[in-house]
Image: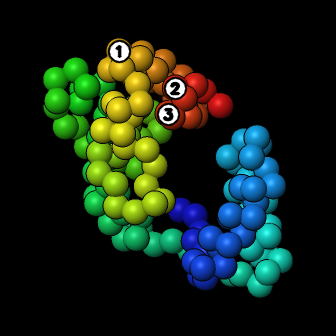
Amino acid sequence: MGTVPTNKELWHICETEIKQKFKRYPRLYRLYRTRKEYRLQGGEFKEATIDDQRARELCERWVQVIPFLKSGKVIDCTATTRHTKASRPITRIDADTPVTLPELLKMHDRNSILNMARRKNKTPHKAVRWETLEFH
């Protein structure tokens, strides 16, 4: 399921410091360092509930990329299909929302996004940095 920080303000302070120190490091490493710094500063975590994560998913409206770009068809993604199919949110609810499909369409052409989505579907174990359309 995962954990969430209990002190959001302290988390954002730690996150900002780490991003400044480790600009070129992978996101997972920066997350590890942020969690470590947050704990050193006295921050604590609580278990995320299914309701919290599901509510966020529903608000962000995660959909499969290929059907959406090809025909505008909205096929909702659940937590189980999100890791096997290329999917993105179509609605931004706050700064923590990952890059959305409408934002991607402003950054890249439709065919480039479709090609990356096809590659992602073939290799679901790899993570995609959608802003640059590269695996990381």
Residue 80 visible in this rendered orientation of the protein: no
Above or below: residue 100 compared with residue 135: below
Three-letter amino acid code at the position of disc 1: Asn
Q: Residue tagged by mark 2?
A: 133
Residue wearing tag 1 = 111
Label 2: how many Cα within 10 Å (few below 14, some 14–19, many 20+): some
- Give the percent coordinates (x, y) of residue 14: 72, 69
Q: Residue at x 41, y 17 (%)?
A: 112
The alpha-carbon separation of the residues under discs 1 and 3 comes to 14 Å
Residue in the foreground of this view, choosing between 99 and 60:
99
Q: Which mark is residue 130?
A: 3
Question: Dot 2: what SS?
Answer: loop
- Whether 4 is drawn above or below 56: the answer is below
Q: Look at the numbered discs 1 and 2 and tell me whether their residues touch, using CB distance below 8 Å.
A: no
Name which quarter of the figure residue 18 lies in: bottom right
Tell me which colouring the rendered structure shows: rainbow
- Residue 117 found in image quarter: top left
Write the residue at 77% across / 76% down. Answer: 39
From this view, report whether residue 36 is shown above or below residue 10. Answer: above
Label annotation for residue 4: none
Q: Is residue 78 visible?
A: yes
Q: Residue at x 43, y 44 (%)?
A: 99
Q: Residues within 10 Å of mark 3 (few under 14, many from 20)?
A: many
